[in-house]
Amino acid sequence: MRQNYTYRGVKGMRDVFPEEARRYQQLEQRARDLFSQYGCGEIRTPLVEHTVLFERGVGQGTDIVNKEMFYVPAKDEEAGPDALRRMVLRPEATASVARAYVEHEIDKTAGGVQRYYYMGPMFRYERPQKGRLRQFTQIGVELLGSPSPATDAEAIGMLFDYLQSLSLGTLTLMLNSVGCPECRPGYIQALQAFARLKHAGLCEDCRARLEKNTLRLFDCKKPECRAVMAQAPNIQSSLCAPCRTHQDQVLLYLTGIGITPKLEWRLMRGLDYYTRTVFEVVSENLGAQNAVAAGGRYDNLVSELEGPATPAVGWSMGMERILELMPAAAPVPMFDVFVVDPGPDTAGTFAHVTFLRRQGVRVGLEHEGRSVKALMKRADKVGARFTLFAGSGADTDRIELKNMASGEQVSLTWDEIAEHIRNF
Ligand SMILES: [Zn+2]
Ligand SMILES: [Zn+2]
């Protein structure tokens, strides 16, 4: 890394070069293949949204909205007095998907359950000393329109199948219910009463959370707060009958597809929009920040955003976390054939190579004259399967093609090369 560089990139934002980009592509391709088996189609929403969407959708008391918003100054006349904070780079995509669903009246035009997946960059203005990325990449799924516990199980099943297929080591699914507008207020009151009694044992942040964002007391990582909260009332015993039945059904459906979640009553998730099922997939290999993916049911988000009552469930996962866990794959050779042509390439060689590329052969060709030795070294480095000795190939009929693995060398015409390579 170059030191004291004038034009260095923005802190918390990364450059990804081809070798690493290929790992992202693998994850993306696997997602497209698997999610389409479940009838999900890709949704692409803008990177920039109005700030109010997340204030309303994600919630005013959350870290995302209070501390981590990446504002985009708006300069147009419609921006109004809050121009500096009217727009924001999206910190997550669930609120955007719900917004798009309402704005385009999908419930009226499409009908039935809508199944979407998305992938792309999200932005959070994290404090840089935490070493967190300010631009990171998420893949997520949102299923809108079904209240059925089978939909929860389906969303979780997709997630689990996806993660299992990536050989990430031991993964555990943690599951809880955060109740509904019927039963949650009673639980929050009980929790507040408990926390007021234990006030002295909580950190300053938690004391501030106590009255307004009581459920977030469970999010605090400080050992003293965790010790207090371990004694807190258990939400599972406050669930109303419909919430309890819903959870039982989710567990039943999950068992049927071979997934056994660990019930974790302290799992609340940090966002306002969740109802009933919430879940996280954790890895043993990631330490404290160990959630690989997380999600839940959000039956009231769409109506919060002025849409029709639309029960929904979804999840998202951070691709960078998954890449950390994924075993490094064997490097994929960049080229099928590398041209060893010591002279500057002629128009003839260039045309033949282009002809090969048009037939689907990946050909490496350097346009500057270099020694045979240097070119062979380069062919080796890029992992070419064959080398092609063009020489004066443009003018003669036969070209020497060498198989780099076996050392075997054959003499072919340009027309025969593509076919020959396909047979290996
Ligand atoms: Zn309930
Ligand atoms: Zn605390």
Image (spheres, helix red, strand yellow):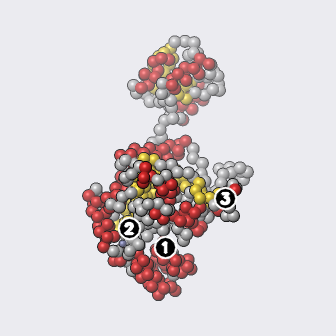
Left or right placement of residue 361 versus residue 47 in this view: left
Question: Which residue is depicted at the point 41% across and 49% down?
Answer: 110
Residue bearing mark 2: 276
Q: Residue at x 53, y 35 (%)?
A: 382
- Disc ID at residue 79: 3
The answer to whether the residue bearing label 2 lies less than 8 angstroms from the nearest atom of ligand 1 is yes
Identify the mark nearer the N-term, 3 or 2: 3
314 shown above or below 224:
above
- Asked if residue 162 lies left or right of residue 134, the reply is left
Residue 335 visible in the shown view: yes
Measured as percent of width and height from the top left, residue 213 is found at: 50, 75
- Of the residues tagged 1 and 2, which is closer to the observer? 2
| Residue reaching furthest to the top | 396
Q: Which kind of residue does numbered mark 2 sit on? A: Arg
Q: Nearer the viewer, residue 291 or 115?
A: 115
Q: Between marks 1 and 2, how big is the CA–CA gap?
A: 16 Å
- What is the quadrant of residue 245 in the picture? bottom left
In the rendered image, the vertical position of residue 226 relative to residue 306, given as above or below: below
Please rate how many residues cluster around mark 3, counting C-alpha atoms within 10 Å: few if below 14, some from 14 to 19, many from 20: some
Rounded to the nearest angstrom, the CA distance separating label 3 from label 2 is 37 Å
Identify the residue under disc 1: 216
Q: Is residue 292 visible?
A: no
Mark 1 or 3, which is nearer the eye? 3
Dot 1 amino acid type: Arg
In the foreground, 420 or 29:
29
The residue tagged with tag 1: helix, strand or loop?
Answer: helix
> What x and y, as percent, mark residue 173?
37, 62
